[in-house]
Image (cartoon, grey):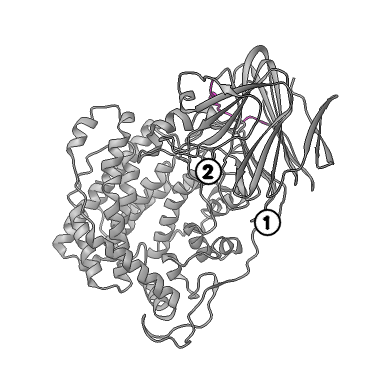
Amino acid sequence: MAEDALERIELMHPCLYMNQAQIDLAKNNIAKHEWAAKTFQEMKLSADKMEQMKLPVFDTAWWQEAKTKDWRTTYPENMQHSYFVPRPAADAAFNSAIVYALGGGDIYGERVKKVLLYYTTYAFESDQPDTGMNYSIWGSNLLYAYDLTYDRFTPDERVKMDDFFKRLIESVAARDEWWIATGTGGRHNNHYAWHKLMMAQYGLFYGKDEWVTRAIESQDGFRELLEVGLLDKGLWFESSLNYHYVAISAMLDVARMFRNSGYPLDLYTHKFANGRTLEDGLSGMIQILFPDTSIPTTGDCYGGTSRLMGSPFYETAWRIYHKPMYEWLIQGMKPGRESLFREDGGFGLQVPGSRVGPPGAEARNPKPETLKPRTVKPPSVESRVFPQHGYVMLRSVEGTKYWGSDSWAAFLNFGVNSVHSHADKMNLILFGKGTVLAVDPEAHASAQHAFSSQVQKELNRATVCHNTIMVDGQGNGGISENLSLLDFQRTPEVKTATIADLKGLVYPGVKLQRTVCVTADYVLDVFQAVSDTEHTYDWLFHTRDDEGKTRMYGGFQPTTLPDAVPWTWLKNPRSATKDDSWHADWRQGDVYFRLNMLGVPGTEVILCDFPKNDKFEPPAVPMVIARRKGKSAMFIALYQAEKRDLGVASVTVGTEQTLKVRVSVDGKAREHSVSILR
């Protein structure tokens, strides 16, 4: 390769995950502070498990058959051999290398060396598209480990290691070039961040600056990923908020390596085009969280929910940027590995007393050292639109009092279909009384590789998984532009948004419009559909219940659903005809939740069980379908939630130039004006 002709620049090792100054700082904290010594002891105990680990078997025969198939069908076996098999020992070696570098003893260095030399036999046989990312994830940990234990290798052993990492980077680079040439996964995909991480790390370690430059400046390098991949002041573009940190974590690793090795570009703080910075990817997410700091589960999330409070990403953010909003996110967090590198010897905490001498020495202060959170003011948030993504967040309480409150928050999606998006246009996710009430459920996959699992393909990405409208039993079509935001208003009492498909992009020939009004007492949801021809409109709703039940009366009888996916994933369907207004109830802990639906003659209400996972283990996720037929349909729903008995609610409608929806809860009335879809 071209870099072989360049003169190698010898660097001081270690210089990637830690440099000598950071090692000295961490050792000092371990010697002085009880919490740091305890953290290090836990790291050693974890690293000791490596002694009992069996080294992985690197089978290559599987590839002889797999390479003859369409790569889209080989995800499971490829993930098994290029990721799930090699990663555990690589992670363990990295952890043991840190313990060695921080003074754990030669035994940890020898264990790491044994693993690293064993991995020099790995063949990198697969060229399936995902292998570039897979190899980078565990390969970068091996290079971290090698950097931290470099002094233990003989010249002959280093030749073996050099050959291994050369084959690794060549394989990653080949996959990167293939992705760029074929457009697989689209531009700026999160995979590129991992390809480029491996290039940057290899270039830094071996003093080959052309690899570092390639990682930054080539197509879909870090410059382009940050300048184009972050939208709406810091949200990753891939139509899944869950995937945000997949890309950001790789870039944070590179920023760490740049700073530790003295590379002239500080990726933590550098401003790219339009002032975009890596920090935007940390601060941007805070503005879209629910009150418990959980991330709305839009797009591929594989049935999981992430919370930012206590996230290790923000332990790093606080250490680097020293901003109160990051310190707030780590309040009460147990000190971890990252806390050892705090220059103030703390953890964003007040630490009374300190210990002198090495770990195990007698403390100067006989009382146990304690960690007391400082009082940190949380960030202020408000209801807002994310126009590039096509998201809306409505909050009944704004400012700093939002966090940890029982307030309502409503998340709406009117954005384009991109990588990791679902057929979920005009979807609603609703949070209230400390929990998610209208859920975007996704069934957990039992397969290791959830992305390619049957349930992900057949159910989780389908429209029946979301709180929106289906037309004629068909899923949403993909859209290449955002739908329309017709209205967005913030008053102290009511936050309102209206999103619409006025062009028939989601369902050809059908106009859709959804208005959501959030108040302190309830959330009003008006969903309209209009067409020149008759259709069947299914209004879909999913929630949680401790027993997996929907409590609703009215003579429900067993019914059938279409005998095709995704419908076959729904169990226990039963239906009843409702001409008058009706309501359904659920309970999560001490939270009582009610859906009130304004009556329309001929409405068929179908209750069914959405699976919690692909094994159909209880409890199920309760699902409601309100079905109407005609050229148009209007669904008016009112949501209530309390940690006590629910108030008596009524909804009445009057029609003038606009729809006048009058809501009364326990005698307290308010009128909402909603535009009529024509």
Residue furthest to the bottom: 364
Residue found 18% across the figure and 57% down from its top: 117
Prevailing secondary structure of the magenta residues: loop
Name which residue type carries label 2. Leu
Task: Name the one closer to the observer, 474 or 214.
Answer: 474
Residue furthest to the left: 156
Is disc 2 placed on a helix, strand or loop? helix
Name which residue type carries label 1. Ser
Q: In this view, does 629 lie above or below 46?
A: above
Expressed as whole percent of the image width and height from the top left, the position of residue 231 reads: 57, 43
Q: Quadrant of residue 603?
A: top right
Expressed as whole percent of the image width and height from the top left, the position of residue 497 reads: 71, 37
- Magenta segment, which residues? 474-484
Tell me: 657 left or right of 561.
Answer: right
Residue 379 visible to the viewer:
yes
Magenta stretch encompasses residue 235: no
Expressed as whole percent of the image width and height from the top left, the position of residue 601 reads: 72, 18
Residue found 49% across the figure and 79% down from its top: 369
Magenta stretch encompasses residue 480: yes
Disc number at residue 357? none
Q: Name the residue under label 1.
A: 380
Is disc 1 placed on a helix, strand or loop? loop
Q: Mark 2 points at which residue?
A: 241
